[in-house]
Amino acid sequence: MFKKVQFKLTKIKYTGKSIGDNIRVNIEILDKNLQIDKRIKVGSTVEFMEEIGIFPVDQKSFTTKTKITISEKDALFNDTNNIEKVVKVDTENSKSQKFVCIIELREKCFWKNWGKSIAKFEVNIEALVAEAIKYIPDVDNGWLKVKIADGNIIYLPAFLKVQPEYVEGGREYFKILEGSYKNKKASVNLDNANNKSSRLLTDVKHESLIYLQYSISKKKLIIGNKKYQATDYKETPWKKGWYDIELPDYPHTGGRGYLDKSFRAKTWFRIGHEGERYLHTGGNSLGCITITEVEKWSEIYDKLIKARKGDFLSVGVLEVID
């Protein structure tokens, strides 16, 4: 199972003789680097919660080299020293794992290479292990073709949250964490065009829930200060009230006739948690709220697709008004 190891600088303790208080700390772990400039007086301890870096791992342990450099930025001399320490993190331990590095710094002086004042800096680093999170990429008009554990082929919407588990036979296996297939296991082929790397994303940021209004009388969908022309079906009128708006469930063929105006036309958002009433684009409605300004559907899609209500199923809420 894929996990991530996060390293943080948590504390620096300054003891021994004073060599000044204008301290710079630089910590390097693999390709990550953290630099801190801080006024620290001898005899004091300063608390931090600064991230050094996050590293993916699929082994039972993660071993790496840490280089720590301490400098006192004197007006005439920069007193500097560094150490390298190998740290080993147990990735099966979810509790905080702490590592302490002690660096001695001897003060320079005018008439000698080194003075007699020796300062000690105790640098505390914390490692935390968590399950890795990845996201479905935005491909093929917003839908990634995957295979679920029973062998059936399904399509997952862009930016859906998943938990990677392992790679085998040219495929990456993962657990779906939200949406219609929540808790299902699935897999996708690796990206052959990119050295068989993962197709899943790691740098997606979900937004808070989105709030929409639909006016029955004006036939307008309202998002913030924007209004979009819409239509509904008079034989199945909407009741005033509040409805959840779900994550997209599958590519809807009803939108294929509008792909020339919006390549997102096959992505529909169900309104409420049952039935077949959706928010989508098109020319008419059979009970849904249909955005007739097809060329603006991608704009609406962009507002909704990364929004999350927090229930692992919805992107936001819709209020139906007169």
Image (cartoon, rainbow, N blue to C red):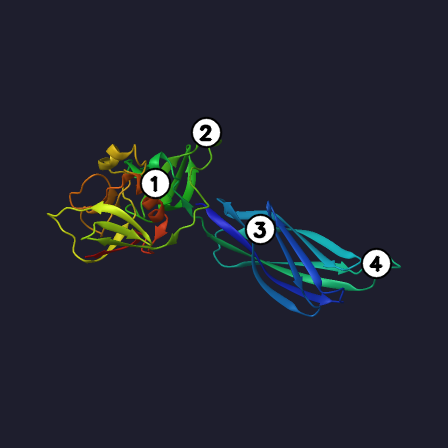
- Front-most of 312 and 129? 312
Q: In this view, does 38 lie to the left or right of 144?
A: right
Q: Disc 1 designates what residue?
A: 186
Distance CA(mark 2)–CA(mark 1): 21 Å
Quadrant of the snapshot with the C terminus:
bottom left
Q: Is residue 143 visible?
A: no
Query: Which element type, helix, strand or loop, lies under badge 1?
Result: strand
**Left or right side of 198 for 111:** right
Circles 2 and 1 in contact, beta carbons < 8 Å: no
Earlier sequence position, callout 4 versus callout 2? 4
The answer to whether residue 301 is left or right of residue 234 is: right
CB under 8 Å between callouts 1 and 4? no
Mark 2 residue crowding within 10 angstroms, few (<14) / some (14–19) / many (20+): few
The mark closer to the camera, 1 or 4, is 4
Sequence-earlier tag: 4 or 3: 3
Give the residue number, with chain letter if any, for mark 3: 88
In the image, what residue type sits under mark 4?
Trp
Q: Residue 114 carries which label?
A: 4
As helix, strand or loop, the secondary structure at mark 4 comes to loop
Whole-angstrom CA distance, mark 4 to mark 2, is 57 Å
Alpha carbon separation for disc pair 4 and 3: 34 Å
Q: Which of marks 2 and 1 is nearer the N terminus?
A: 1
